[in-house]
Image: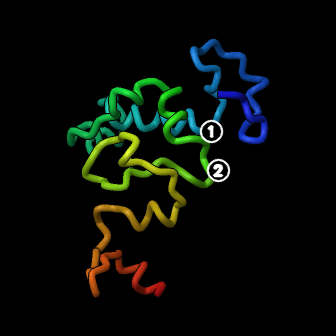
Amino acid sequence: MTYDPSVWDISKNKIATTHGMSGYPEYPAWGGMKQRCYNQNSDSFPLYGGTGKVVCERWQSFQNFYDDMGPKPSASHSIDRIDGSKGYYPENCRWATPEEQARNTRTNRLIEHEGRTQCLAAWADE
């Protein structure tokens, strides 16, 4: 993994880490994911760790998380679980836009029509 200055400028962050990437924008996403699942003092814990959602063993390492997820496509993208009832692991996660995140929540009403299932907002767009 080589440092790409177009992604983030970490030259001012000389924090000692094993990966040297704590200044990358993906690092807070990784940290937040772990907080939600493991920190009982986190406001989000009841909906994540409190319901049994965990971060896979491989992603306990930021370097592995970054290797699997790659750089965020833009500053507005955030980590999204494809199936919200499951935890964080490579096959269940993606970088998503705020719109994609909003359409992938447990409170959305899903409607099936002609073999396709989408939330109401997606059908309205069509």
Q: Residue at x 38, y 51 (%)?
A: 81
Coloring basis for residues: rainbow
Q: Is residue 54 above or below residue 93?
A: above
Task: Give percent across and percent down for residue 107.
Answer: 29, 66
Q: Quadrant of residue 27?
A: top right
* Residue identified by numbered label 2: 75
Residue 97, percent from left and from top = 54, 60
Vertical position of residue 23 compared to residue 89: above or below: above
Mark 2 neighbour density, 10 Å: few (under 14) some (14–19) many (20 or more): few
Q: Quadrant of residue 2?
A: top right
Along the horizontal axis of the image, is 15 left or right of 98? right
**Which residue ends up furthest to the left in the rendered image?**
51
Residue matched to label 1: 25
Say what amino acid the circle numbered 2 marks: Ala
Indicate which disc residue 2 carries: none
The one nearer the camera, 47 or 56, is: 56
Q: Is 5 left, or right, of 125 in this rendering?
A: right
Residue at x-position 76% and y-position 33%? 9
How far apart are the two marked residues, 2 and 1, measured between alpha carbons?
A: 8 Å
The residue closer to the viewer here, 115 or 83, is: 115
Q: Is residue 106 above or below residue 56?
A: below
